[in-house]
Structure formats: C-alpha cells, structure tokens
Amino acid sequence: MALRPDLAIIADAVPAGTRVLDVGCGDGTLIAALRDKGVDARGLEIDPANVTAAIARGQSVVQGDANHDLGEYPAGAFDYAILSQTLQTTERPDRVIEELLRIAPHAFVSFPNFAHWRIRLALLWNGRMPVTRLLPVAWYETPNIHHLTVSDFRELLRERGIVVERAWYLSGDRPTSAAAASWRAEHAIFLISRG
C-alpha cells in the first residue's frame, strides 16, 4: 500500500531499531511501513473502527485521545513520537506538542498549511472557507479546530524553545522548497526536539 506523501517522508526519516508512538495513527498504515523497516512502532487512535482495523492486522494500537491520554505514557518511553495531520484537530496543540516531547526526545509533526495561496485566494475571491483536495469537507464538517500556518507553527516552537531539526514542505504530493513555504506549501512536516 502506498503511503500518503507526508507519511512516506516520515517513514523514510525514522531510523530502524527505534521505538515510535504514532499518535492519531488511523488504521495503522504508517505503523505497518515502520515495522517493515525494523521499527518498534505502536499507535494511539481515537476512532474505534481504526483501532479495530489496526489490531486485526496485528499492530499494537490502543484507543485513546491525544488531548487527554498522552500523560499516561512515561517520560522518554519512545525515541520518536509522530503526530501526522492531527495537530489542527487537538484542543490545545501547544500542550500536545509538549507531551510529545516529554514521551520522546524527537517528534514528527505534520499539518495542512492554512496560509497556502489557494486557500488565501478562495477566501479573498469567495469570502468563504475553501473546500480543496486536501481539505475536502465544508467548514461545518471539518474536524479541524485550529487553522494554523507554517509561520504560526514556527513561532510556537520559537516561543517554547523547541528546535526544528528538519522540515519538509509539500505542494500537492511533491516536495517544494522552504522559500516562501508559508505561501507555497500545502502541507508541512517538521522534525522537532528540545535540542
């Protein structure tokens, strides 16, 4: 099964032999790819149907909510924590990031960039929240409760003293440069740490 582009980047970047917690792991697609390369990957997922699907495939996934259940994991329990396309759906993204970096020294965080030029243009032209390929539902159906941008995320990290080890940006399904990423990138993937 082909991985979503942000998941493929994360899967390639996670070293073999490490311990990983995929928070908001969905049906476990990334966990399967990580296990294939020798990673001890586990998951936390809120949707019971996704948990059932992952467990049926032999994956170690528990049902839980990133907003409330990350505190149950001991500090330093993993080498990497992953939060892919979930940050914008959390109640307090700042607290979730702090928890990720408490349970693992490194965290991958990916999110849609709500400052992408197509979103800006749709708001300017139509005066309405856009529906796009990557944000395919109307504003009243979306699980997104925090509409962040690349610049917003970088500023949060700076305020908290969190280091960006590496960043990747996607336009469509292809990598794009960091130049004007807040304008050009539809998705952003960050590898962060306490430094």
Image (spheres, helix red, strand yellow):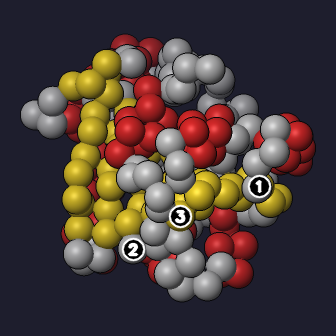
Q: Which sits earlier in the primary sequence, circle 3 or circle 1?
A: 3
Q: x and y percent of residue 92 in the render? A: 55, 67
Name the residue type under label 3.
Arg
Q: Which residue is mark 1?
A: 61
Task: State the image coordinates of residue 42 (x, y, percent, origin top left).
Answer: 66, 57
| Left or right side of 34 for 125 | left
Locate residue 11: give its quadrant.
top left
Residue drawn at x 82%, y 59% is 63
**Left or right side of 151 for 57:** right
Question: Residue at (28%, 34%) from the top-left corner?
Answer: 169
Query: Which numbered disc covers residue 105?
Result: 2
Disc 1 secondary structure class: strand
Image location of residue 186, percent across then percent down: 36, 28
Residue 102 image point, x, y percent = 48, 80
129 or 79, which is in the foreground?
79
Q: Earlier in the sequence, mark 2 or mark 1?
A: 1
> Residue at the location (54% across, 85% down)?
75
Query: Can the viewer see residue 76 in this picture?
Result: yes
- Residue type, label 1: Val
